[in-house]
Image (cartoon, rainbow, N blue to C red):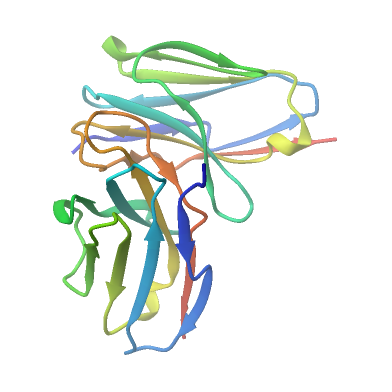
Amino acid sequence: GIQVEQSPPDLILQEGANSTLRCNFSDSVNNLQWFHQNPWGQLINLFYIPSGTKQNGRLSATTVATERYSLLYISSSQTTDSGVYFCAVERGSQGNLIFGKGTKLSVKP
Amino acid sequence: KAGVTQTPRYLIKTRGQQVTLSCSPISGHRSVSWYQQTPGQGLQFLFEYFSETQRNKGNFPGRFSGRQFSNSRSEMNVSTLELGDSALYLCASRTGTALGELFFGEGSRLTVL
């Protein structure tokens, strides 16, 4: 099956710093999503980005499908950005998202 | 528009018991999928339902089962609970008729004692 690798596993930043999270996947996919898991466990949708580039405020994402990777950029980080960020991919269309192990981000004031 | 709703949010069971979790998808969504999250295994796909039919199933034992009703609401059941079943169970929905993003509920946190 498809392998999804996220890096780095842990990231500690000072408030205001920028960061880049990476997601590599081992096969072609037709769905890629980035999530932020809040402290209560809910997965919050950040981007649905099987290819191309999208921006939403301080966050942006780029997926290069031909090279099988995606990047999530966080600019001017805030303490509320802390948490675990997951990348998930899907080959078919039957709800089978394959998740990476996540990047745990800690933003210090 | 209401999001994906899962009940109960928290529950405690003992080994050998069974548990039923419920998921109400976003209005208009016909596909519901279930995931298990544990510290050791991460997020893993359990199964997906569309129009009351299971379309896809992950690699879990038969103790894990589910169903979907005509209003697209879904339930999952775990029988003969084991300590290792302690996890956060997440439900997701999407339209199901085309590719698109999945939206997750807040999850049901199960503790097995």
Left or right of residue A66, residue B102 in this image = right
Residue A89 on image: x %, y %? 32, 32
Q: Residue at x 34, y 42 (%)?
A: B28
Residue at the image point whose x is 31% and y is 66% from the top: B75
Is A2 located above or below residue A52 in the figure?
A: below
Location of residue B60 by image quarter: bottom left
Where in the figure is residue A91, as x and y percent of width and height?
Answer: 21, 31
Instruction: Tell me if residue A23 comes above or below residue B73 in the rendering.
Output: above
Quarter of the N terminus of chain A within the rendering: top left
Q: Position of residue B76 (x, y in %)?
A: 30, 67
Task: Describe residue A103's horizontal placement relative to residue B61 as left or right.
Answer: right
Q: Is residue B111 left or right of residue A81?
A: left
Left or right? Give the position of A99 relative to B8.
left
Question: For the point 47% across and 24% down, which residue is it?
Answer: A22
Figure quadrant of residue B93: top left
Q: Tell me the quarter of the picture where residue B101 sits.
A: top left
Q: Is residue B86 above or below residue A77?
A: below
Residues B50 and A65: in front is B50
Q: Nearer the viewer, residue A7 or B109?
A: B109
* Front residue of A100 and B65: B65
Please identify the quadrant where the C terminus of chain A is shown: top right
Return the x and y of residue A107 as percentages of the image width and height.
Answer: 74, 35
Residue at image position (75%, 19%) is A76
Nearer to us in this view, A90 or A25:
A90
In this rendering, the count of numbered labels is 0
